[in-house]
Amino acid sequence: MRFGWKNVFFVVVAGATLSSAQAQWSIGASGTREAPAGKHRYAYLVFANPIPGREAEFNDWYSNVHMGDLVQLPGWTGAQRFRLVTTVQPPPSTAGYRHAYLMIWDLEAPEPNGPLSMSTAAIAGGKSRRGAAFNYNAGAGSSGTWEAIGPRVTRPDGKGPTIPDVSDNKTPRPNRYILLELTNALPGRDADFDKFSKQRIPSVLSLPGWMAAQRFRVADTPGRAPSGKPKYLTVWEVEGASAQAIDSTLNQALERGAVAKNAAADESTAEVVYWEPITPYITKDDFER
């Protein structure tokens, strides 16, 4: 696992055609993203592919119908869609490239099964409309729920996302991405994994382009099929000319010892993948104006 561009502009992943794009949307909600008293914060991740040949229809439904259908439900506080980035070479991990699209749903509730049950009922009843181009076949998608185990942490220097000065008519905004780092701890080393994970965040966020991070642990959702994904999740928010440039900055820091690897992480099961935002972050308020 590496924390590593080939001139590829179109690549087919599980029936979807991915193109390089400028990724300019802001990432997620602002602030520390901590749940209010009496509730917990969850990230419900849905990894999906369209039915081959129906990608435009899939994206239209997902962005313009499905997102709004679910964020109206109690406990569903926000959502944002992402597309897989496949141009980083070498890939940060070998696994994690089966699905072309990702949805991150933000949930806030005393426990996750209430909001998840509401979505199941809304889909079954027709309040949340199914997408004809969404591939519902067994094994075509994957989903899972992770609980936040700490606040969103931003850069120690206080720097926010780059916006060129109003007098600068030549410099474009940098592109924005997330890096999903899904990892298991080595057997018997969960405590060490947790310690190392917390310790390395400030050093990574000191690097150019590395803007914020939040850590999660898989949530207890009895009766729901396991995602098959690793137990621990860190969502890194990054910006730069390309995902390749951002990844190279991290790898150079690892090589010179400015950032340490997590010695308690099981690299053999890791999924470390860049994604680019393809919608803004939306909430229920976006549908009530």
Image (cartoon, grey):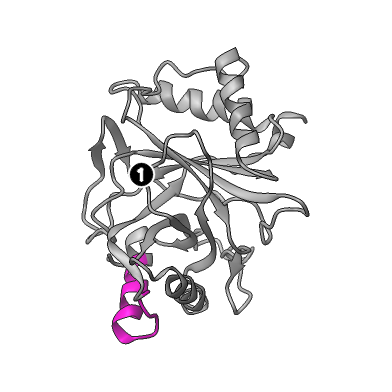
In the drawing, does residue 7 fall left or right of residue 121? left
In the drawing, does residue 88 fall left or right of residue 126? left
- Residue 202 vertical position relative to residue 85 in the rendered view, above or below: below
In the rendered structure, which segment of residues is drawn in magenta?
A: 247-262
Count of all numbered marks drawn on residues in the image = 1
Task: Identify the element where label 1 is drawn.
Answer: loop
Crowd tier of the residue under label 1, counting other residues whose Cα lies within 10 Å: few below 14, some 14–19, many 20 or above: few
Q: Where is residue 114 in the image (x, y as percent from the top left)?
A: 65, 34
Q: Closer to the camera, 9 or 170?
A: 9
- Residue at position x 47%, y 72% in the image: 191
- Residue 207 vertical position relative to residue 286 in the rendered view, above or below: below
- Residue 218 vertical position relative to residue 139 in the rendered view, above or below: below
- Residue at position x 69%, y 57% in the image: 34
- Residue at position x 36%, y 44% in the image: 228
- Residue 209 vertical position relative to residue 49 in the rendered view, above or below: below
Under mark 1, the amino acid is Gly
In the drawing, does residue 52 fall left or right of residue 152? left
Q: Position of residue 181 (x, y in %)?
A: 40, 59
**What is the quadrant of residue 192 in the picture?**
bottom left
- Locate the N terminus and report the quarter of the image it occupies: bottom left
- Residue at position x 72%, y 49% in the image: 39
Residue identified by numbered label 1: 228
Q: Closer to the camera, 222 or 184?
A: 222
Q: Is the magenta stretch mostly helix, strand or loop?
A: helix
Q: Where is residue 126 in the image (x, y as percent from the top left)?
A: 59, 13
> Is 256 inside the magenta-drawn segment?
yes
Q: Where is residue 150 in the image (x, y as percent from the top left)?
A: 61, 64
> Is 136 inside the magenta-drawn segment?
no
- Locate the C terminus and report the quarter of the image it occupies: top right
Q: Closer to the camera, 124 or 60?
A: 124
